[in-house]
Image (tube, rainbow, N blue to C red):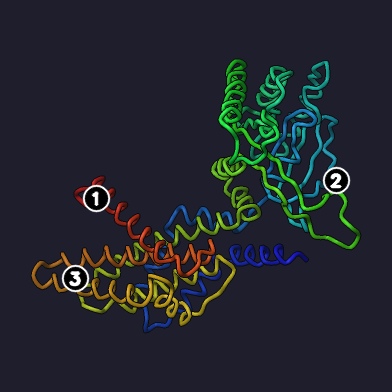
Amino acid sequence: MNPKFEEMQKRLSHIGNLNNYIEQLIDKVPGNLISQKQRRKLIDAITDDEDLNALLEGLKNPRPPRFVLVGRTGVGKSSLINAMSGKYLAEVSDVEIGTKKARRFTYESEGQVYFEVIDTRGIGESETFDTKAEDELAGVIREFRPDALLFLQKATERAHIDKDVLITKQLMEKTGGELPLIAILTHIDELNPSRIKEPDLYPKDKIDLIAEKTGQLERIFMQYGLDATAILPVSSYIEWSRDPDNVPDGEHDHPEIAFDGRKGIEELLDFLEESLDVRAAIHLGLTVRLNRVATRIAERFIRIFSALSATVALSPIIASDIAVLLTLQSMLMMIIAYLSGRELEFKTARDLLISLGGIGATGFTLRMVAQQGSKFANLVFPGAGSALSASIASGGTYAIGKAATAYYLRGVPENELQQVVKEAQKEFEEEQKSESKTNPLE
C-alpha cells in the first residue's frame, strides 16, 4: 500500500476515534492534578460546545459527498473531480440506475471512495427535449439524494449555454428546487493567452477575461430566472508524473502531480464544505483536506480550553492553579497531537510545554509568574487581580494551542514558533478588546 495512503488512514482512524480518546484522556488524568468538580466542568465544556459537537457528530458517520454533474461532453467533469481530490481517481460505475440519460459513478483511490456522482449523459445535446426521459432522470436524482448539483460550462465556449441553463432550470424544478446549484466555469486556463498555465502568472488581460466570462454566465442564469448558489471559475489543469491510464502491471500506486495548474479549486472546496451536510463535509475534508478538518477541530478545543483556563485562574489563592493549568494545557497539546496521528503521554506533553519554542522555558515561566503575581492585587482591590490573571491564563493557553496546531498540523519548525506565539497573543488581545467594546458591561 502507498505509504502516504497508510499515513492518511492512520490519521483518519485517529480522528474518527477522537471521542473515545478524549474520554480515556480525561479518565487518565491523575486525581491529584484536577478535582472531580474540575473534571466534570471539563466534560461539560466539551459536550456543551455546539460547533464541536457538530464536527464530532460528523466524524461518527461520515459519507462521501453526492453530486449531480450537468454539462456537455468535454466540459471536464472527471478532471474537476481529480482536481478537487488532488489525486487521479478511478471511475467505478457498477450501479444500474434505470435511465439512459445518466450514469452513476463512484470516484475511488485504493479502496477509498471520495465522491459519489450522477453524471448526466449529454443533457441538452439531443436535438429534441424528451420530457419523459427528463422526468425519469429527475426521479433518479431525487432517489440519489445529492448534496448539490454542479453545472459545468467550458469557459472557451458560448454556444448552447442558453439551452443547457433552461434544461437545468427545468430539472431543478422537477427535483423540488431546493438542491444547491453551483455553476462552475471550467478550463479558464485555456482562455487567452492559453500558453500561460501557472495561475500566479496569469496576466491582467487573462484575469479580466475570466471575470468577463463569469459575468456572462451569471447574466444568462439571471435571464432564465435560475438562482445559482455560486458561480465559480476554475482551472483543473494538472500534469501527472506519468500517464495515469498506462500503469505498469504490478504497480498499484497512483501518479503524483508533476505540474499543478489548478485555480479556484480551493475556493470551490471552501464553498462546498460550508454548504454540504455535515457528514458529507467532514468526509470531503477528511479525504481531500485532512489538515483542514483537524485544524477546525483543534480550533474548537483551543477555545474550550482557553475559557476553562480563565475560570481556573479565577481562584484567589496564589499558586493554587498552576498544576491545573499545566494539566489543561498538556491535555490540549495531547489532543492536537492526536489529530496529527501522534499520541503523547502526559509527561511528554508537560515537557514540551517548557521546551517548545517561545512558549517554553523562560517565556512560560514569566507568564506564570505574572499570572500568580497579579493575584497580590486582591489584597488591595479584591477581584481585580483575579480578572487580570484569568486573561493571562486564557491567553497563554490560546497561544499554546495555536503553537501546537502550527507544530503538529502545519509542520511549522520549532525555531518559527516564537513568531506563531506572538501572533496568537496579539490575536487574543485584539479579540478581548473587541469583545469588551461589544459587551462593555461584562
Q: CA distance from mark 3 to mark 2?
A: 68 Å
Indicate whether 211 appears above or below 25: above
Residue at coordinates 53% horizontally, 55% vertically from top-left? 55
Dot placed on the residue nearer the N-terminal end, 2 or 1: 2
Measure the alpha-carbon separation of dots 1 and 3: 20 Å
Residue at screen point 39% across, 59% down: 303
Left or right, 151 with respect to 409, comes to right
Residue 99 image point, x, y percent: 84, 32
Point out the tag, 3 or 2, that comes first from the N-terminus.
2
Whichever of callouts 1 and 3 sits on the residue coming sooner in the sequence is: 3
Residue on which disc 2 sits? 94
Q: Left or right: where does residue 421 sit relative to residue 68? A: left
| Residue under label 3 | 374
Query: Is 136 displayed left or right of 420 in the figure?
Result: right
What residue sits right under mark 1 in the picture? 436
Q: Are marks 2 and 1 in contact (CB under 8 Å)?
A: no
Question: Which one is nearer the viewer's eye here, 119 or 400?
Answer: 400
Give percent across and percent down for residue 93: 83, 44
Q: Is residue 21 left or right of residue 246?
A: left
- Give the alpha-carbon distance from disc 2 to disc 1, as whole Å: 59 Å
Q: Quadrant of residue 340?
A: bottom right
Secondary element at tag 2: strand
Residue 294 screen position, x and y as percent: 54, 59
Q: Residues within 10 Å of mark 3 (few under 14, many from 20)?
A: some
**What secondary structure is marked by label 3?**
helix
Amino acid residing under circle 3: Ser
Numbered disc 1: secondary structure: helix
Q: Mark 1, residues whose alpha carbon is within 10 Å: few (<14), some, or many (≥20)? A: few
Amino acid residing under circle 1: Ser
Displayed quadrant of residue 332 = bottom left
Instruction: Please identify the quadrant where the N terminus is shown.
Output: bottom right
